[in-house]
Image: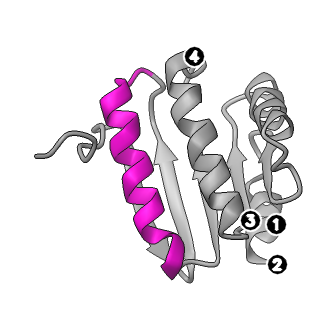
Amino acid sequence: MPTGTATPDTTTLEVEDGILHWTNEGFFISVEEAKGVKRHAENALGRVDGILVDNTGAGGTWPTEIDEVWGKLMQNIYGEGLPCTTVAASAANAMHVNRLSRKNETDDLIRAFKPGEKGEALDFVAS
C-alpha cells in the first residue's frame, strides 16, 4: 500500500446519510497512519455534508505530531465549508479539540462535544 494510505485498525470511516462517521478506538497511531486517515477523510469531502468524529472509545490524547496532521485536515475541511464535530472521550479532550480549532481559526464550523453529547454533535453537522 502506498505511503500515507494505510489506516489503523482502531479507526473506521463510513458515510451514512451524507455524514462521514469517523470513529477512533485509540489515540496511539503513527504519523503515516494519521496521514492515511487524513487522505481517506479528504477523499470523502466532496461527497458529504458534514463529518462526525467519535472518540468516545479512545483514551488519552493525540501525540503532538498527530495533532499537526489533524490541524492540516481541519483547514481542508474548513476550506470546503463543511461542519465537523468531535465527540470527545472526555471534557478535557473536547477542550483540547476546541483549542486546536480556535488556534486554526476554524471554530465556526469545527467543534468538539463532551461524551454523552453525540446527539448535539450530530445536530451541528446535519444543520
Q: Secondary structure at mark 4?
A: helix
Front disc: 3 or 2: 3
Which badge, 1 or 4, is on the more N-terminal residue? 4
Q: Secondary structure at mark 3?
A: loop
Q: Where does label 1 land, which residue? A: 124
Number of residues whose C-alpha sits closer than 10 Å to that of mark 3, classed few (under 14), some (14–19) or many (20 or more): many
In this view of the protein, which residue sits in the foreground, 63 or 112? 63
Q: Nearer the viewer, mark 2 or mark 4?
A: 4
Of label 3 and label 2, which has the lower sequence position?
3
Residue 92, given in percent of the width and then of the height, sits at 80, 22
* Snapshot quadrant of residue 55: top right
Circle count: 4
Residue 57 is situated, as x and y percent measured from the top left of the image, at: 53, 35
Disc 2 is placed on an element classified as loop
Task: Examine the structure image and report whether residue 69 is included in the region drawn in magenta.
Answer: no
Tag shown at residue 114: none
Q: What residue span does the magenta drawing correspond to?
A: 28-47
- The answer to whether the residue labelled 1 contacts the one labelled 4, judged by CB atoms less than 8 Å apart, is no
Residue 56 visible in this rendered orientation of the protein: no
Colour theme: one colour
Q: Which mark is residue 83?
A: 3
Q: Are marks 1 and 2 in contact (CB under 8 Å)?
A: yes
- In the image, what residue occupies the spot 85% across and 45% down? 105
Q: Amino acid at mark 4?
A: Thr
